[in-house]
Image (spheres, helix red, strand yellow):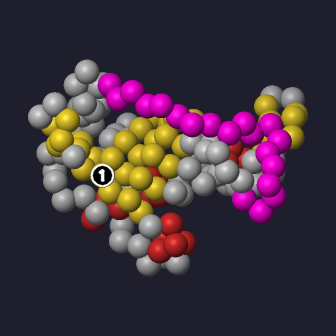
Protein backbone atom coordinates (compact mmCIF):
# COMPACT_ATOMS: atom_id res chain seq x y z
CA UNK A 1 0.00 0.00 0.00
CA UNK A 2 1.26 3.53 -0.71
CA UNK A 3 0.16 6.69 1.11
CA UNK A 4 1.51 10.16 0.27
CA UNK A 5 4.49 8.63 -1.45
CA UNK A 6 5.34 6.38 1.50
CA UNK A 7 5.10 2.61 1.24
CA UNK A 8 3.19 0.73 3.94
CA UNK A 9 3.80 -2.99 4.35
CA UNK A 10 1.12 -5.04 6.14
CA UNK A 11 1.85 -8.54 7.42
CA UNK A 12 -0.43 -10.86 9.34
CA UNK A 13 0.09 -13.80 11.64
CA UNK A 14 -2.36 -16.66 11.04
CA UNK A 15 -3.99 -17.41 14.44
CA UNK A 16 -4.43 -21.15 13.78
CA UNK A 17 -0.81 -21.61 12.69
CA UNK A 18 0.42 -19.50 15.60
CA UNK A 19 -1.55 -21.60 18.09
CA UNK A 20 -0.01 -24.76 16.58
CA UNK A 21 3.49 -23.16 16.68
CA UNK A 22 3.81 -23.56 12.89
CA UNK A 23 3.71 -19.86 11.95
CA UNK A 24 6.77 -18.13 10.51
CA UNK A 25 8.39 -15.67 12.93
CA UNK A 26 6.83 -12.21 12.35
CA UNK A 27 10.17 -10.61 11.48
CA UNK A 28 10.40 -12.93 8.44
CA UNK A 29 7.01 -11.77 7.13
CA UNK A 30 8.32 -8.32 6.22
CA UNK A 31 10.31 -7.86 3.01
CA UNK A 32 10.54 -4.08 2.48
CA UNK A 33 13.04 -2.51 4.90
CA UNK A 34 12.15 1.11 4.04
CA UNK A 35 8.37 0.71 4.34
CA UNK A 36 6.23 1.51 7.37
CA UNK A 37 5.68 -2.00 8.74
CA UNK A 38 2.39 -2.88 10.41
CA UNK A 39 1.77 -6.29 11.95
CA UNK A 40 -1.77 -7.67 12.25
CA UNK A 41 -2.00 -10.37 14.90
CA UNK A 42 -5.00 -11.94 16.56
CA UNK A 43 -2.86 -12.78 19.60
CA UNK A 44 -1.33 -9.87 21.58
CA UNK A 45 1.69 -11.85 22.76
CA UNK A 46 3.18 -12.00 19.24
CA UNK A 47 4.70 -8.46 19.34
CA UNK A 48 6.46 -9.18 22.64
CA UNK A 49 8.30 -12.08 20.98
CA UNK A 50 9.54 -9.99 18.03
CA UNK A 51 13.10 -8.69 17.88
CA UNK A 52 13.29 -4.91 18.52
CA UNK A 53 12.85 -2.90 15.33
CA UNK A 54 10.73 -5.51 13.51
CA UNK A 55 7.87 -3.04 13.05
CA UNK A 56 6.73 0.19 14.67
CA UNK A 57 3.03 -0.79 14.91
CA UNK A 58 1.22 -4.00 15.85
CA UNK A 59 -2.59 -4.29 15.86
CA UNK A 60 -3.98 -7.12 17.99
CA UNK A 61 -7.12 -8.47 19.66
CA UNK A 62 -8.21 -11.84 21.10
CA UNK A 63 -8.75 -10.96 24.77
CA UNK A 64 -12.11 -9.11 24.56
CA UNK A 65 -10.95 -6.88 27.44
CA UNK A 66 -11.28 -9.90 29.72
CA UNK A 67 -14.93 -10.37 28.59
CA UNK A 68 -16.06 -11.10 32.15
CA UNK A 69 -14.48 -8.92 34.83
CA UNK A 70 -15.25 -8.34 38.50
CA UNK A 71 -14.87 -5.04 40.37
CA UNK A 72 -12.22 -4.86 43.07
CA UNK A 73 -10.31 -2.14 44.84
CA UNK A 74 -7.58 -0.84 42.54
CA UNK A 75 -9.27 -1.93 39.32
CA UNK A 76 -11.15 -4.80 37.78
CA UNK A 77 -10.19 -8.46 37.90
CA UNK A 78 -10.19 -10.21 34.52
CA UNK A 79 -11.43 -13.77 34.87
CA UNK A 80 -9.78 -14.94 31.65
CA UNK A 81 -6.51 -14.27 29.81
CA UNK A 82 -4.82 -12.97 32.95
CA UNK A 83 -1.26 -13.81 31.94
CA UNK A 84 -1.01 -11.63 28.82
CA UNK A 85 1.49 -8.74 28.89
CA UNK A 86 -0.74 -6.63 26.64
CA UNK A 87 -4.41 -6.96 27.62
CA UNK A 88 -6.25 -3.94 26.19
CA UNK A 89 -5.36 -0.46 25.03
CA UNK A 90 -2.17 1.08 23.66
CA UNK A 91 1.28 0.01 24.83
CA UNK A 92 4.48 1.87 23.90
CA UNK A 93 7.66 -0.18 23.79
CA UNK A 94 10.89 1.51 22.66
CA UNK A 95 10.49 0.42 19.03
CA UNK A 96 6.87 -0.78 18.73
CA UNK A 97 3.44 0.56 19.57
CA UNK A 98 1.06 -2.31 20.33
CA UNK A 99 -2.69 -1.65 20.07
CA UNK A 100 -4.95 -4.32 21.61
CA UNK A 101 -8.63 -3.83 20.79
CA UNK A 102 -11.40 -5.26 22.98
CA UNK A 103 -13.33 -5.94 19.79
CA UNK A 104 -17.05 -6.58 19.45
CA UNK A 105 -17.42 -10.32 19.96
CA UNK A 106 -17.39 -12.84 22.74
CA UNK A 107 -16.03 -16.35 23.19
CA UNK A 108 -17.65 -19.35 24.89
CA UNK A 109 -20.28 -17.27 26.74
CA UNK A 110 -22.41 -14.83 24.70
CA UNK A 111 -22.09 -11.83 27.06
CA UNK A 112 -19.62 -9.40 28.62
CA UNK A 113 -19.39 -8.02 32.13
CA UNK A 114 -17.36 -4.84 32.80
CA UNK A 115 -15.57 -5.29 29.45
CA UNK A 116 -17.29 -2.98 27.01
CA UNK A 117 -16.98 -3.78 23.29
CA UNK A 118 -14.89 -1.39 21.22
CA UNK A 119 -14.21 -0.31 17.67
CA UNK A 120 -11.02 1.73 17.50
CA UNK A 121 -10.22 4.55 15.07
CA UNK A 122 -6.47 5.03 14.85
CA UNK A 123 -4.73 8.18 13.67
CA UNK A 124 -1.08 7.53 12.90
CA UNK A 125 1.38 10.27 13.83
CA UNK A 126 5.16 10.43 14.12
CA UNK A 127 6.65 9.66 17.50
CA UNK A 128 10.08 10.12 19.03
CA UNK A 129 12.13 6.93 19.18
CA UNK A 130 15.44 6.11 20.84
CA UNK A 131 18.62 6.78 18.87
CA UNK A 132 19.45 3.98 16.47
CA UNK A 133 15.87 2.65 16.23
CA UNK A 134 13.91 3.27 13.03
CA UNK A 135 10.38 3.64 14.33
CA UNK A 136 9.15 6.09 11.70
CA UNK A 137 5.41 6.48 11.47
CA UNK A 138 3.68 8.35 8.65
CA UNK A 139 4.15 12.09 8.34
CA UNK A 140 0.99 14.02 9.18
Q: Which quadrant does the C terminus fall into?
A: top left
Nearer-the-camera pick, 102 or 29: 102
Nearer-the-camera pick, 10 or 22: 10
Q: Residue at x 45, y 34 (%)?
A: 92
Say which quarter of the image contains residue 123.
Answer: top left
Q: Residue at x 22, y 25 (%)?
A: 139
Q: Residue at x 74, y 39 (%)?
A: 115
Where 11 falls versus 37 (above or below)? Answer: below
Name the magenta segment's main secondary structure. loop
Q: What is the number of callouts on the image?
A: 1
Asked whether residue 37 appears in the rendered view, the answer is yes
Residue closest to the far top: 140
On the picture, is 122 further left or further right than 63? left
Asked whether residue 82 appears in the rendered view, the answer is no
Q: Is residue 108 part of the magenta span, yes or no? A: yes
Where 28 falls versus 110 (above or below)? Answer: below
* Image spot of residue 11 (x, y percent): 32, 57
Which residue in the protein does label 1 denote?
A: 10
On the picture, is 117 further left or further right than 121? right
Q: Is residue 112 part of the magenta span, yes or no? A: yes
Q: What are the residue bounds of the magenta stretch?
A: 107-125
At mark 1, the secondary structure is strand
* Image spot of residue 30 (x, y percent): 25, 58
* Image spot of residue 48 (x, y percent): 47, 52
Say which quarter of the image contains residue 28.
Answer: bottom left
Amino acid sequence: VEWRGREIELAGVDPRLFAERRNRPPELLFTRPDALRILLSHFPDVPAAMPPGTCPLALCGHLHGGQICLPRPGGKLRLSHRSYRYDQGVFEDPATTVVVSRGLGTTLLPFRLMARPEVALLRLRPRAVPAGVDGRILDP
